[in-house]
Amino acid sequence: GNPPPPEAFKEGWPIVTANVLPDDLTGKKWGIVTNWRECGREWERTAQVAYYENGSNVFSSTAGIRLHGGRSREPWNPRKSFRLYFRDSYGSDRFKPGVLFGPESEPLRHLIVHSDWPEESYFAHGLALDAARQIGCVTPSFRHVIFYLNGELQGIYFLSEQVNREHWVSRMGHRNFLMHVFRSKSVEKEAGDAIEKLVDRLQRDSGSLDLGWVEKNFDLDSLSRYIFLIV
């Protein structure tokens, strides 16, 4: 792979590098950036990934890489976000424990190398997550890094754990919850059905709802914190 240039370490930032075959990124037929509308395991490519702290290579492994995001995938945006997948078949089934986040985030089998956009808003997402965490919301852990892709500087990104069921089980400590991810093609049927029933009830009978029903169907503490943050 391509290590960062020596001057990259002068500012003391953590650094993430990913090296991917050019055809796997921008090839007309197979490139994940070129074919930005595609998603899923079929559109996972192989990358050589490394993480540096204080000028030292703390972790390196082969990993799967996919394009991440919604509108940010589109051709107008030059700063793409990516997901990293660690699997036995690549060499490591998780990121090195105890390096990035606290024990509540282990094991890290998926990571997002996330760009903030627009380009001038490098810290917007991180500030929002910090504010949410400060008032008690459950948020993914993250840290800001410098990102290099195939030896080219991409700028300031943030590295975060991915919010999915497998990982959130370790965060919650149990499996007794439904998870619905909006704008995702991978929807748990039970969770999707529950959301539809909930929305239908709110639309039909919003005037007759009582506090008991609301407390039974919502985590009011969590909901109140998120509403407060948005307002």
Image: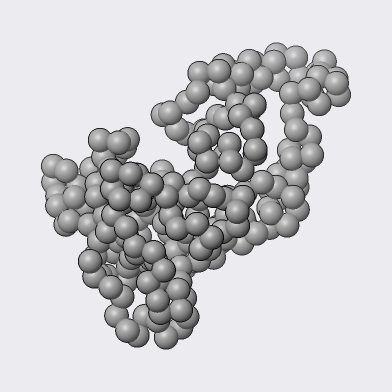
Q: Quadrant of residue 210?
A: top right
Q: Which quadrant: the N terminus?
A: bottom left
- Compared with residue 3, is residue 104 higher up or lower down, i.e. above or below? above
Q: Quadrant of residue 227?
A: top right
Front position in the image: 110 or 130: 110
* Residue 156 seen in render: no
Image position, residue 183 (x, y; %): 47, 34
- Residue 24 as seen in the image, left or right of residue 200: left
Q: Residue furthest right?
A: 211
Front position in the image: 3 or 146: 3
Q: How is the image coloured?
A: one colour
Image position, residue 120 (x, y; %): 47, 68
- Compared with residue 122, is residue 138 higher up or lower down, i.e. above or below? above
Q: Residue at x 30, y 50 (%)?
A: 91
- Residue 132 as seen in the image, left or right of residue 146: right
Q: Residue at x 73, y 57 (%)?
A: 134
Q: Residue at x 22, y 57 (%)?
A: 20
Front position in the image: 158 or 95: 95
Q: Residue at x 34, y 62 (%)?
A: 60
Q: Quadrant of residue 42?
A: top left
Total number of numbered labels?
A: 0
- Compared with residue 146, is residue 41 higher up or lower down, i.e. above or below? above
* Residue 30 seen in render: yes
Image position, residue 169 (x, y; %): 58, 36
